[in-house]
Image (cartoon, grey):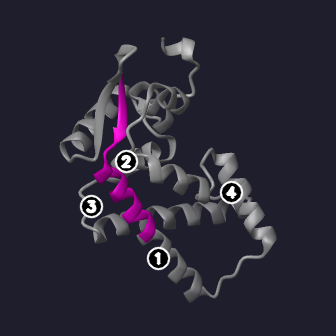
Amino acid sequence: MTTTDPLVEALLAVSRTMVAIAARNLATLGADVTLPQYRTLVALAGQGPQRSAVLARELGVAPSTLTRMCDRLVRKSLIHRFHRHNDRRSIWLGLTPQGRDLVGEVMQARRTELATIARTAGLTAAPRDLTMLSAFVRASGELPDDEWWRRWSTSADPVDDAQAMRAARLTPNAIA
């Protein structure tokens, strides 16, 4: 099925390409994670520790699906579960240093492959093109690359309750 919008058609093709590159990089690095598991790790890298219910909503999966996926990621030592001292009912999820490092390795491999593809295709970007791509990233709810890497660099650091509340986009009264 096609649309009459050439931009949407081009973005669909780029989306398929990006998924293929991510899958290829995971396989090349020998990462024992599926694409949905990897997306979970990327979300935790960009947003920091999150309550499991918030992460399930963000990923668009049922809480039980997230629980099973996270069971596997915990067994692989890529994430850890924990409770905040002031909210023992909520389960929080965060990256381990191994999980953060895996995400960084895959992202660097993707960067290298994308640079090779762009160079091979003879692509250059005019400022207008970069503005359009940045607007697309913002509209999709994703972080710009520099902000994502800044958050990635601290994503496996121990967090205090104030950082956890910001990560969950809650006010202090909401989890007290």
Circle on res. 36? 2
Q: Which residue is mark 4?
A: 3
**Callout 3 crowding tier (Cα within 10 Å): few <14, some 14–19, many ≥20:** some
Q: CA distance from mark 3 to mark 1?
A: 17 Å
| SS under mark 2 | helix
The relative height of residue 123 versus residue 67 in the rendered view (above or below) is below
Pointer 3 or 2: first along the chain? 3
Q: Main secondary structure of the magenta part?
A: helix
Q: CA distance from mark 1 to mark 2?
A: 21 Å
**Callout 1 crowding tier (Cα within 10 Å): few <14, some 14–19, many ≥20:** some
Q: Answer with left or right where residue 25 lies relative to residue 111.
A: left
Q: CA distance from mark 1 to mark 4?
A: 29 Å
The relative height of residue 162 versus residue 27 in the rendered view (above or below) is above
Q: Which residue is mark 3?
A: 31
What's the amino acid at mark 2?
Pro
Q: In the image, which is nearer the foreground, mark 1 or mark 2? A: 1
Please tell me whether residue 104 belongs to the stretch shown in magenta.
yes
Q: CA distance from mark 3 to mark 2?
A: 13 Å
* 30 vs 91, nearest the viewer: 91
Please tell me whether residue 100 belongs to the stretch shown in magenta.
yes
Q: Which residue is mark 1?
A: 113
Q: In the image, which is nearer the foreground, mark 3 or mark 4? A: 3
| Image quadrant where residue 95 sits | top left
Q: Which residues are magenta?
A: 91-108
Residue positioned 26% across, 34% down in the render: 68
* 87 vs 109, nearest the viewer: 87
